[in-house]
Image (cartoon, helix red, strand yellow):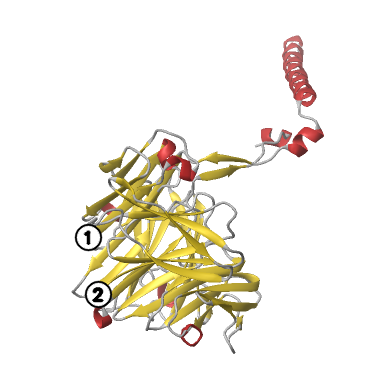
Amino acid sequence: MDRILRLLGSRYATAGLVLVALLALYGAATLSRPDERTRAAAKSVEAPVTSAFLVCPWGGEDGRMSLLTPPKDSAGGTSGGRVDVIQTTDGKAIASVPTAGTFLAEDVRRAKNGSYTVRGGGGLAAGLEAERTVYWGSGPDRGLAGTRCARPGTDLWFLGPGPDAAERVDLYLTNVDAQPASVDVTAMSGEGPLDTVDGHGTPVEPYSTKVIRIGASAEGLGDIVKAARDLALHVRAATGRVAASVRVRIGKKKGIEWMPLSPAPATSLVVPGVPGGGGRRQLLVGVPGEQDARIRIQVITASGAFAPQGQDVLDAPAETVTPFDLDRALSGKAAAVRLVSDRPIVAGLSAQRGADVALGTATLPLGASGGLVTDNRFSAYVQLTAPAAAATVRVTSVDAQGQGTPKDVPIGAGRTVEIKLAAPRPGDAGYGTLIVPRPGSGPVHAARTLSTGKGDKGLFTIMPIGPALGTVTLPPVGDSQTALIP
């Protein structure tokens, strides 16, 4: 009995000492914590990006992968670092960029397991952009197609034609991390939400790409999506993160294209890059919420902004994709479309020219770091739209030998300006372009149209231009005892 009492006393004494030590630590932390005024004054900090991953999908066709690293003072980066193009599966490097302000283009063949990864580190990661472009002038897949190489994320939206309007729609999911990812894919169509548990919990193994044919498997939402003519895909990573891209084959000799990544749902959107000329132009509007949206539509052209007569308001049902024909409002003019809604929405663009199709989307305005396009090997035009206030944009072309002469482009308030891009030196086979709003400019939205050929043989693609990711916002650090609680 004495032994038992001594043992219990020892355990209680140990527990008491641990409790005293925790109270002492807690008291010291409390006395040393910043006062209320210091914590209230804490602000978010802008830090330069020092690491970047961009995934370039391989859609079955040989093509070109191009990338551009902006000058370090353009993207807020630091000096040093490098950029490597690697095979996603085995990490084997196939190209590298050692200096900032450099354009690189590589003709790439079949990728192992469906993708390449562009990996940037140090100062060269800030503002890094890459594109994958494919040109087939003949054959069953004839077309000009392009896609921005995707950054890994956890909540992604795409809008475009569904299986009823396209022969094939493929979703590419790439995991660039060492841990497995689990992905949920849901969708909306013109008939409403496509309610199904198919597409939930799709695994994506580390350093791999999974290709899912929409409407042809359980992971691709099964038979329920086959009748969808217009489609909004929502890709959400339940665990981990993925880079996602969507390839569309309209049909034999009817064009191929990639759906661009759309910004998150918002109540105010601008869709730039609506090309001029003949052919059908159609806006796609998705309403993710459970309430209908009332949307005011404004077209912004070179001559000004206006509400289309009889088409100024669109009533879009909840959980549905609604098409909106732009042909009557545009009259063949290049334009952007501004949407103001009472509910968060997503928006995309479908355009036809000759026997080819191009897809666009809403974009975020260009920030201080500007935006980049990285493959302008054919006839290339950039559309710049200032929906609210006048702006001036500096446009600089860059090739493998360096930069050309910058050109400042003024944009009136509520105007769209279209300019033809030019190579830094005559005879350049390809080049990139850096587009940076000048200080004091209002918001600017941009897109590039790349085209080749004429008439029924003309091919084209649209590349929405988003803000270059030169910096990230780091939230203020706060003290909280809850951080110690599992």
Q: Earlier in the sequence, mark 1 or mark 2?
A: 1
Query: Measured from the top left, where is residue 354 in percent x and y?
Result: 30, 81
According to the picture, the residue beneath numbered tag 2 turns out to be: 453
**Outermost residue, bottom direction?**
310
According to the picture, the residue beneath numbered tag 1 turns out to be: 62
Is residue 243 toward the left or the right of residue 379 in the image?
right
Query: Measured from the top left, where is residue 393 in percent x and y?
Result: 49, 57
Amino acid under label 1?
Answer: Asp
Label 1 packing within 10 angstroms: few (<14), some (14-19), many (20+)? some
In space, the residues marked 1 and 2 are separated at their CA atoms by 20 Å
* Between 214 and 124, the one nearer to me in the picture: 124
The residue drawn where x is 43% and y is 44% is 52
Query: Measured from the top left, where is residue 34 in percent x and y?
Result: 76, 29
* Residue 119 to residue 196: above or below: above
The residue drawn where x is 26% and y is 78% is 454
Residue 215 seen: no
Helix, strand or loop at label 1? It is loop
Is residue 419 toward the left or the right of residue 270 in the image?
left
* Residue 22 to residue 59: above or below: above
The mark found on residue 193 in the picture is none
* Between 300 and 142, the one nearer to me in the picture: 300
